[in-house]
Amino acid sequence: MARLREAAPKFIYYEDGGLLVGWLEEYPDYRTQGKTLEELKENLKDIYEDINTEKIPHIRKYGELLI
């Protein structure tokens, strides 16, 4: 599998019933969870890789329009 370039995407997370639920700031539609922060980060890395290798089709993205 091709290696993705190094990146540092931001993520948001919260605790829910003993689990940490989180998503990448740029892709809020794709959430994951983990028992620890490290597990959550690993799961977020998997989502990031899947998005950027086009394993997940029709990804909604957002941009910024300067006027």
Image (cartoon, grey):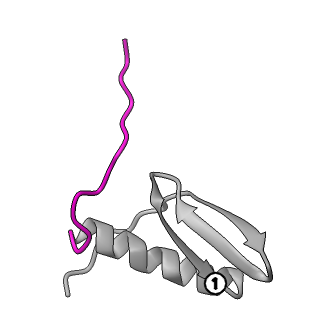
**Residue 22's spot in the image, x, y percent?**
61, 68
Q: Which residue is mark 1?
A: 34
Residue placed at 39% from the left, 70% from the top? 48
Residue placed at 61% from the left, 87% from the top? 39
**Residue 26's spot in the image, x, y percent?**
45, 51
Q: In the picture provided, is 38 more to the left or to the right than 8? A: right
| Overall secondary structure of the magenta section | loop
Q: Residues within 10 Å of mark 1 (few under 14, many from 20)?
A: some
**Which residue ends up furthest to the front in the rendered image?**
17
Residue placed at 37% from the left, 18% from the top? 66
Q: Is residue 42 above or below residue 62?
A: below
Image quadrant where one finds the N terminus: bottom left
Depth order, front residue of 43/7: 43
- Circle 1 sits in a helix, a strand or a loop, which is it? strand
Q: In the picture provided, is 19 more to the left or to the right than 59? A: right
Tell me the quarter of the picture where residue 18 sits: bottom right
Residue placed at 70% from the left, 76% from the top? 20
Q: Which residues are magenta?
A: 54-67
Q: In the picture provided, is 56 more to the left or to the right than 39? A: left
Q: Is residue 41 above or below residue 58?
A: below
Residue 51 colored in magenta in the image: no
The amino acid type of the residue labelled 1 equals Gly
**Which residue ends up furthest to the top in the rendered image?**
67
Residue 61 colored in magenta in the image: yes
**Residue 52's spot in the image, x, y percent?**
27, 66
Tell me the quarter of the picture where residue 14 sits: bottom right
